[in-house]
Amino acid sequence: MPETIIDTEFATLWYYPDKKIVAHKLHKFFTGQSFKDFFNKGTDVLQQNGAYKWLSDDRGFSALHPNDREWAFADWSPRTVKAGWKYWAIIMPESILGQLSTRRLIEAYAAAGVEVQVFATMDEAIAWLDSK
């Protein structure tokens, strides 16, 4: 059973202690400090628990604000990879704009050494992460 770390109108963050998976579900667009705080907390949970897997349910995601994208590439992702992030399972956004934005993220994080796979359901994503 996952532990709920954060649950807001914008997003939910869980940790699966038995699987060493940090997981999030984005409910709607958010940006700025609340976006940074949310993802920083995920990195903290990953590092504190020796986890190395991340599951993103991004069906409710549209696109990153340019400032958030810059922060994610320059700050968040290098710290999270350094903290141990190795595998990323993604459930793609429903919006075309979100899909395009997520594809750019996939390419960047794959180049940073994170193995990335896209899935249609949470069960498929968790099964893949379980195999890692």
Image (cartoon, rainbow, N blue to C red):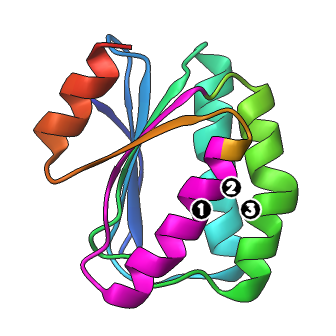
Q: Residues within 10 Å of mark 1 (few under 14, many from 20)?
A: some
Residue behind mark 3: 72
| Image position of 114 (left or right of 33) | left
Q: Start and end of the magenta stretch?
A: 86-110
Gap in Å between the C-alphas at discs 1 and 3?
9 Å
| Image position of 124 (left or right of 88) | left
How many discs mark residues in the rendered view?
A: 3
Residue behind mark 2: 108
Residue at 19% across / 24% down in the picture? 127
| Image position of 6 (left or right of 50) | left
Whether pointer 2 and pointer 1 mark residues with C-beta atoms closer than 8 Å, the reply is yes
In percent of width and height, residue 66 lies at 73, 86
At label 2, the amino acid type is Ala
Q: In terms of secondary structure, where does tag 3 sit?
A: helix
Residue 100 drawn in magenta: yes
Whether pointer 1 and pointer 3 mark residues with C-beta atoms closer than 8 Å, the reply is yes
In percent of width and height, residue 75 lies at 86, 55
The answer to whether residue 17 is above or below residue 100 is above
Residue extending furthest toward the right: 74
In percent of width and height, residue 72 lies at 74, 62
Visible in this render: residue 45? Answer: yes
Residue at 15% across / 36% down in the picture? 124
Q: Quadrant of residue 51?
A: top right
Q: Residues within 10 Å of mark 3 (few under 14, many from 20)?
A: some
The answer to whether residue 21 is above or below residue 17 is below
At label 1, the amino acid type is Leu
| Image position of 97 (left or right of 122) | right
At label 3, the amino acid type is Ala
Residue behind mark 1: 105
Q: In terms of secondary structure, where does tag 2 sit?
A: helix
Q: Quadrant of residue 55?
A: top left
